[in-house]
Image (spheres, rainbow, N blue to C red):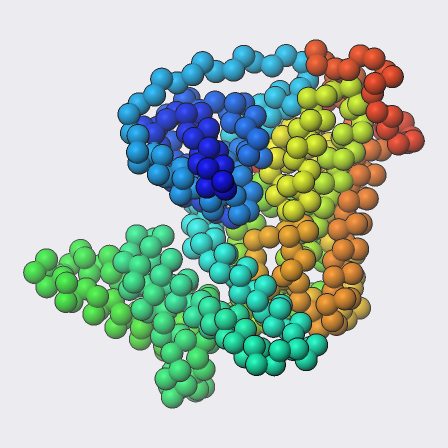
Amino acid sequence: MSTDKNRATAAAILPLVGGPDNIVSIAHCMTRLRITLRDRSLVQDEALKALPAVMGVVEDDTYQIVLGPGTVARVTPEFEALVAEGRAAAPAPEPAPAASGHTADELAAQGAAIKNAQKAKNSTPFKLFLRRIANIFVPLIPALIGCGIIAGLNGFLTNMGWVPAVVPALAAMASGFMSLIAVFVGYNTAKEFGGTAILGGAVAAIIVFPGVAKIDAFGQQLSPGQGGVLGALAAALLAVQVEKWCRKWVPEALDVLVTPTLTVLISGLVTIFGLMFVAGEVSSAIGTFATWLLATGGAFAGLVLGGLFLPLVMLGLHQALIPIHTTLIEQTGYTVLLPILAMAGAGQVGAAIAVYYKLPRNRSIRATIKSALPAGFLGVGEPLIYGVSLPLGRPFITACIGGAAGGAFVGLFNQLGTAFGSTAIGPSGWALFPLLDGKSGMGMTIAIYAGGLAVGYLVGFAATYFFGFTRQMLTEFNTGPDADTDPQTAPTPPTAAEPVPDATSPVPVGR
């Protein structure tokens, strides 16, 4: 039955993106089905968003359909199969009529316009490079999550003294992937940057090989794993350049022998006698700085990180944090930054709830919020961001205020000595609870994280309810052709003060 449901979802999506012949490539990440399209004009955005399984759409370098964690991994193979089965062109259905009034459809259209404008700004060489770096690490997230949860289970059983015979097996399952993560990073790096993937993995494998402990570099004895994922990333990038040089100059008759040999030899020597040491120093500096930052200024650091994370996502700069998260997990077993950054999603949820109560007559926007809130609580924020708060403008800013408050709460406890983090990257919101780990026990760790979420929800709600709308905005959005004109049927919002003085228009916030 589950397979039938996933296939039905894929079958419903396919004609709305232009049919099989409009699909160039298919991939997926943690929450999104990512499609490269031949003709963007054939896509029916509003019809897609109306599908029950679709939480939203995001247009970036690919067309991304938000399906949520778990679902996307099951729908994607069905979608690929349907595309492979029928490459015959299908006539594109007529686009849905434009919505009138200030409805959820109109907000979504405004959000899409903002995203498209920001997309052009994000297509700088630096941001495109960051996006490619993210593409290296995103495929690793399922393994990080699985191993992280097993590590948490292993720690729980160890602390409770239960099933001692199982503990070593769980430890092996949890640690095996992390001990070789450099190899996977090297493999994906070479693949992403146009080299032979296995050669990137081969060079990166040098970093985790136990025999490097017998080698002296810069007057110090190397240790297996020194440099970690940053060293593997640099080593594989070098390998790609060496391989491309060899392909250019080595005669074709000798290419199969000479190119892989020189690629591994040259890149390997540079890695052993340079990159491992340098990357090791950088990795240590990252861990030391993160620990110092939260230990000395945790509340302020949390305020800044939690408040600025949503704008960072819109600017594409959040992708620079992925290698940092992975490095911290390698060093300490968890990343202390992710629980703080997750507070941005809490602020967004609180802001969306406030919008729901501030617009009692706009059933269209309220329906969008009701359908997107469950995903928002689980850390999937795109439907609320791009369908509600971002096109409204002010609620996006007040959502950031909620995220800043939650981040300050979590950061404060780090400053007071209760450090904790996530054993994997990817999940957020309530989905992060199984991945939490810390030095003060799970009870305290869970309580602090839950408290941060609560602060984010409450401050995001209050900031949006009191300051998220001007009188002009309420006049425009708390009505429409789909409005409930009978005051008796409109839900009564919580008692609140009047909104702040009038402003000329919503603040446009780009992605």
Residue 488 visible in the snapshot: yes
Left or right of 289? Residue 247 is left
Looking at the image, which residue is at 66% across and 63% down? Answer: 436
Q: Residue furthest front?
A: 1
What x and y, as percent, mark residue 8? 46, 33
Q: Quadrant of residue 248?
A: bottom left
Looking at the image, which residue is at 28% across and 25% down? Answer: 88
> Relative to residue 458, is residue 510 depicted above or below?
above
Looking at the image, which residue is at 7% across and 60% down? Answer: 253
Left or right of 368? Residue 76 is left
> Which quadrant: the C terminus?
top right
What x and y, as percent, mark residue 485? 80, 12
Looking at the image, which residue is at 61% across and 72% down? Answer: 154
What x and y, as percent, mark residue 355? 76, 30
Q: Quadrant of residue 483?
A: top right
> Relative to residue 22, is residue 240 depicted above or below?
below
> Relative to residue 51, is residue 418 depicted above or below?
below
Left or right of 75? Residue 399 is right
